[in-house]
Image: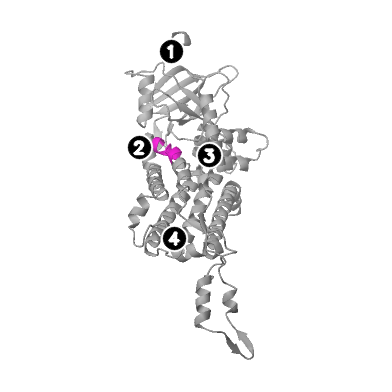
Amino acid sequence: MGLSLRSWIANEGGKHCILITWLSVSAWIFWRTFILYCSGAEYHYLHKMLGLGLCISRASATVLNLNCSLVLLPMCRSILTVLRGTRQVSSKKARRLLDKSKTFHVTCGVAICVFSVVHVGAHLVNVVSFSVRYSDEFPALNVAHYRGQDPHLLILTTVPGITGVLLVLVLFLMFTASSHSVRVGNYEIFWYTHNLFILFYVVLLMHVVGGALKYQTNVDAHPPGCIPANQTRAHSDTWPNQEVDGELVAESREMSLVCKEDAHFQPHFPQTWLWVLGPLCLYCGERLYRYIRCNASVTIVSVVRHPCDVIEVRMLKNSFKARPGQYVLLNCPSVSSFENHAFTLTSCPTENKETFGIHVRVVGDWTACFSELLLPDLEHSEILPMTNQRRYPNCAVLPAPGCMWMVRLAVHQRKFSIMKSVCVWLAASELRLSPVSCMLSLMSGVVINCRGCILCGCAES
């Protein structure tokens, strides 16, 4: 029990510490924003009109800003590769946390969906409140043009309303297409809908420009709840001063709350870009760097067809360096110019051999088209020399972070004596485990979800 607990802390402790920190920060900024809009003097009249919907909508918006900025960082694969290969990140635990980047990306995505539902629900209440509680005293505070205006018109005729509807539609497409069944059954749908994030961020930056919610700028000259000067004079004429116990009890308290001027309101300066702009520029720069690196085409040396719809592809690329256990992102413009699929390296370049290889199992549309381009109408293996090579489609390969350290920690650093060689082919797309991980899982009895890991004999694990 003690060994298992220590192993769990060593393997999963860092991940859960980051999760707790992320939850704490999200809860703190939610509560801080909620209290600000609930009791802040500059939001007194706006809160009086909208009530609890104002506090919840703004608090959830702050959490959305945080997660919309964090969700991009785990997808900067080239930066993670550099960090993982530097000497500054020499700890196995730190490298294991970097390998969990996709998990954090999914967690932030789920949080965006959850708080988007809360944010939309709160704003629907606000739209109704703007229509029902139209303020005749402060016309500048209103979004509605008159009392009882149709809330649907407020949504469809304002910038925050139109952009909000677009954001909900884009987020719904991205979220539903990210399910496991869609990714496995039709990866292309997942890929293309996920690239709608560009439209999502553009519309998000436009969403905050409308300025529907306004705050009071002259709180000192117009304290919340103060009495206008004309009403004070009328009140003094109606209720003359009275003397109680020899003291003049006039309107002294009320005079201290007399408004010096009318209330002035203005919308907030947009703050979403302050949260999002940095990570968005970093991610766009990283994508540009990957695109430049992928311009160097890859020469396909040989293609071998194996049983169970598995093909082996051996390639050659100048200055390509990789270590056992890593995976690469494969792009074939003849199939799709925008799709990058991950495959584990089954052979790496050495001093005597510069080629590297992957095994691809035909399980989806992309792999089927890729296989057809490599081996059209052939039922046998094809190994062609470089001098007589058939014309293969152009491909691009980009190295990605490896998983060797993660595998060693996952089996609690047990030592194994492998007496016989085991042939392992990893061929499914989106697979991040190395052949070593499959062998260790078999020898140790540790269950690892290794879809597409095929042993000699075509048995899936």
Membership of 198 in magenta stretch: yes
278 vs 268: above or below: above
Q: CA distance from mark 2 to mark 4?
A: 54 Å
Residue mark closest to the camera, 3 vs 4 = 4
Residue that mark 4 sits on: 139
Give the crowd class for mark 2: few <14, some 14-19, many >=20 residues within 10 Å: few
In this picture, which residue range is highlighted in magenta?
Answer: 191-199
Using the image as rendered, state which of residue 195 and residue 56 is in the foreground: 56
- The residue that appears at 57% across and 54% down in the rendered structure is 25
Q: Residue 384: which disc? A: 1
Q: Position of residue 291 (x, y in %)?
A: 51, 27
Q: CA distance from mark 4 to mark 1?
A: 79 Å
Give the crowd class for mark 4: few <14, some 14-19, many >=20 residues within 10 Å: few
- The residue that appears at 41% across and 54% down in the rendered structure is 120
Q: Residue 280: which disc? A: 3
For the residues bearing labels 3 and 4, Cβ distance under 8 angstroms: no
Q: Which amino acid, by three-letter code, is at mark 4?
A: Pro
Q: Which amino acid, by three-letter code, is at mark 3?
A: Leu
Q: Which amino acid, by three-letter code, is at mark 1?
A: Leu
- Mark 2 / mark 4, whichever is N-terminal: 4
